[in-house]
Amino acid sequence: MADTNAPLLIKRYASRRLYNTETSDYVTLEDISRFIRAGREVQIVDLKSGDDLTRQYLLQIIAENESKGESVLPLGVLTDLVRSYTTEVQSVVPQFLAMSFDMLRDGQAKMMENLGKNPMPAMPTLAGLPTMPGLEAMQAQQEAFLKAMTSGLPAMGKNWSGPASDADESPEDLATIKKQLAELQAKLSKLS
């Protein structure tokens, strides 16, 4: 059994083929991308020279995803990154990016932990006041938003059981949520 805490070692042969040393088979950039999305660290080295090529291949994966329309980096960020290579700001950018992504990961982990403890806190109501129409719709929208937001994230907390499958939702529930979403969109369009 492979140690999943150690980086997955990928060796690049002279033919530029990439070889997974754990499974003893060749892999593609898409395979490497899947390993990383699953939370695995990857190290890519040139077999002959021993040079670490990880950065080069990660940048290639990012470029391919961006060119497929899976844009994560806004044009302004890309422009600022290019500028940072030619200015004295260059020394600050790597630390800033590392801290920003650390904060993002910590925030996601805390959100997943909180969802595991209390998946959907009830909307507050004021005692003695009649129920306001639309609160149920807002709560349904909140649930749908959280479900959509967390569906692509890996399980991070020990209490997190993963996103609910579509089988958990009845067709009536989905129809109700779609209707409520349409009503809210209509109300928003009237406001603007």
Image (cartoon, rainbow, N blue to C red):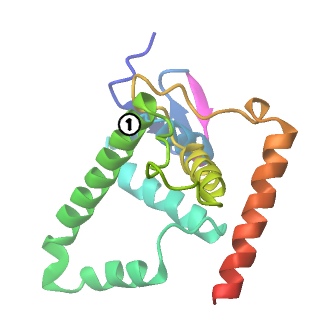
Mark 1 crowd level (few <14, some 14–19, many ≥20, 10 Å Cα): some
Q: Magenta residues?
A: 24-29
Q: Secondary structure at mark 1?
A: helix
| Front-most of residues 102 and 65 | 102
In the displayed structure, 70 sits above or below 128; it is: below
Q: Give residue 160's position: percent from left, percent from top.
A: 47, 28
Image x and y of residue 80, in percent: 33, 83
The reply to whether the magenta stretch includes residue 25 is: yes
In-image side of 100 versus 47 (left or right): left
Q: Residue at x 24, y 57 (%)?
A: 98
Quarter location, residue 134:
bottom right
Residue at far bottom of view: 192
What amino acid type should be assigned to the residue bearing mark 1?
Asn
Q: Is residue 13 above or below residue 124?
A: above
Residue positioned 16% across, 80% down in the render: 89
The residue depicted at 39 percent of the width and 85 percent of the height is 79
Residue pointed to by mark 1: 114
Number of numbered discs: 1
Residue 37, compared with residue 129, is above or below; it is above
Quadrant assignment, res 150: top right
Left or right? Give the position of 119 relative to 139.
Answer: left
Q: Residue furthest top?
A: 1
Q: Residue at x 47, y 82 (%)?
A: 75
Q: Position of residue 50 (x, y in %)?
A: 32, 41
Residue 77, can we see it? yes
> Closer to the camera, 50 or 139?
139
Question: Is residue 53 among the parts visible in the rendering?
Answer: no
